[in-house]
Amino acid sequence: MYISAFKKIRTITVSNLRHNFLPHLILSVLLLMTPFVFGTANVDVKTAAIPLEMFVSLIGIILITPVFLPEQQENIRDAVESKATSPVGVYVIRIGISLLTMLSLITIFVCYLKGNGCAVNLTEAVYGTFSGGVFLGALGLLAYSLSRVITVGYMVPIVYYMLNLFGAKIFFGNLYLFSMSSGSMKEKHWLFATGLILIAFALLIRSKAVRLH
Amino acid sequence: MRNTLFFKECRQIVRSIPFLVYVAVLLFFFIAQYESDFTKVEKPQPGQSDYGTKISDDLRIIEPAAVKSFYSEFVRNSYTAYPVGFYKNVKLNAGQQREMAGILSELTGNPADQITDSSISTVKSDLTAEQFQALMGQADKLIGGGSLYGDTYLSRFGEVSKTYEDALKDYADIVKKDGVTGAYARYFCDYLGIVLALFPVFLAVSSGMKDRRTGMRDIIYSRRASSAKIVMTRYTAQVTTLFLPVILLAAYATAQVVTEYPDFKLQLLAFIGYSFGWLLPTLMVSASVGMILTELTDSAVGIVVQGLWWFLGLFAGVAHIDGGYGRDLVLRHNTVGNTQVYLDSFITLLWNRIAYAVFALILVTSAIWVYERKRRGKWNVYFGFQKNPNHHRVQSAS
């Protein structure tokens, strides 16, 4: 039974990596290259947090938001729902792959910063960037599950990001995206926890939609 | 009858969620950024304590100020830089600091081993302008580019206080050359341009992907209408509907200025004119990038491409935020006034806008070509990502 479940997970994972995930992974890697445009050598902790929070955390939108995208066409959705494996289980595996990939990419990037003479704390930098990515991606995932339009899924976290960029910090409270650059990590716990809750909501909405369908 | 498709597209766009979000963001920027900063430009009076500042190109002002700042950053080993507009604080290693000491020594004429003496902050008397520029360039290179000593920011050390006469001339330029409204219209375009360089791409991508999502693509492909007509109508509908809220806000902003300046001779069409000349090419580019990339890839990759362009362009534009322009898609003019800067850079601005409008039309023409090929079944959009020859080897999850 255990082997059967393991095989199933492996099959879903391989299938996702082959058919859905690769373009998003390539885009995320390209996005990670962008901070090199303005140089990342010899910077202090707060300066290093700027590319991490402003660029690297955006990969959350690329990796998490389109998790439901393969089923956007009705006929594919019907085919998936007719299978014995619960669609929600498939989504959970896909989200897990996205989160693990994001964590790996962020860790590689932070290690590169550290090796390049930047005064960063590895654990804090990875966690801070990851929580921002989880929150933005989860916001997109929820928007997509509610609207069923992928562009809305991308639009909502980008609007939130833009408002953080141009608006005052005070409006966003504990869900402010760029706190690490000003030396605060408290907001990162909130972003991480809220991100997980939003993912759970998105899954709930999706599973209810499946049942109603 | 002839325009049925156009109006149908417009109706679909204005009823879509991305359009509503776009209008909300546009309103937010107008209210929170433009309107909240709206202040009446008053005529300067003699004897005021402050008339603002201006940038002088006098090297006698720039050189000592730059060397003083350089010295202060050297002592703290903390160099400020804005590569691509991003703030960055750079700490150099011992070898690089020694090189910096050498540069400072050449600038001040003092030996490198005495460079930590706080009295050294003046420029060597026989230093030529070329030598000064070259030494500052070396320092900028060591810092990693984008520093206060590079070409972009060095001139800012020439900041001096304006005199009463300077302030009076600026005021006269706003009233006579800009007809008041022109000065506000540039400020209006500065903020709305930020939104228009990004959000149209969402509408374009959404519209392009809708046919596939709803399974309507094959039906549209089989219609008699030409590819050029379908793509151009869709693009025109997007540009028109997205530009309409801008025109409404321009009209409102005009009324606002008219109310504030009842006794002035105003250019009543300035906001509308600036919107067409300054903002429309930005909107056209953003929408056309979304359109061509969606046709090419059948994915939302256009959002990522335009998003990156917007993001990098926005920060790079900070270098000339008060006017001066250049090759930016998002043109910045974050001040009411600076009329002379605008007039001096008008030709650059004009070519910039023409080039972007032409670029947008080239992208739309390319989209027509791609659409036609797809219609004829001659375009594989997946580049092998999804048409995997090993597909049959993957076991079903069920």
Image (spheres, grey):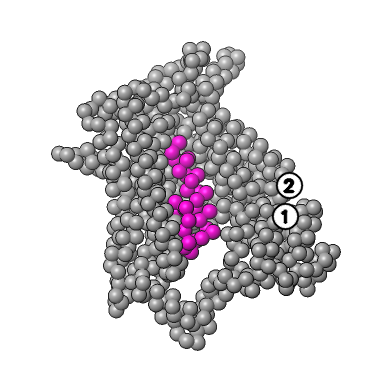
Instruction: Say which amino acid is labelled 2.
Output: Gly
Q: Position of residue A162 (x, y in %)?
A: 48, 51
Q: Main secondary structure of the magenta part?
A: helix
- Judging by the rendered image, the residue that carries numbered circle 1 is B91
Q: Does the segment drawn in magenta span residue A8?
A: no
- Highlighted magenta segment, given as a residue range: B301-330
Instruction: Give the quarter of the image for residue B207.
Output: top left
- Judging by the rendered image, the residue that carries numbered circle 2 is A117
The reply to whether dot 2 and dot 1 touch (C-beta < 8 Å) is: yes
Helix, strand or loop at label 1? It is loop
Whole-angstrom CA distance, mark 2 to mark 1, is 9 Å
Q: Nearer the viewer, residue B249 or B398?
A: B249
- Dot 2: few (<14), some (14–19), or many (≥20) neighbours within 10 Å? some
Q: How many marks?
A: 2
Instruction: Say which amino acid is labelled 1.
Output: Lys
Q: Position of residue B292 (x, y in %)?
A: 39, 36
For image coordinates 53% across by 83% down, the residue present is B49
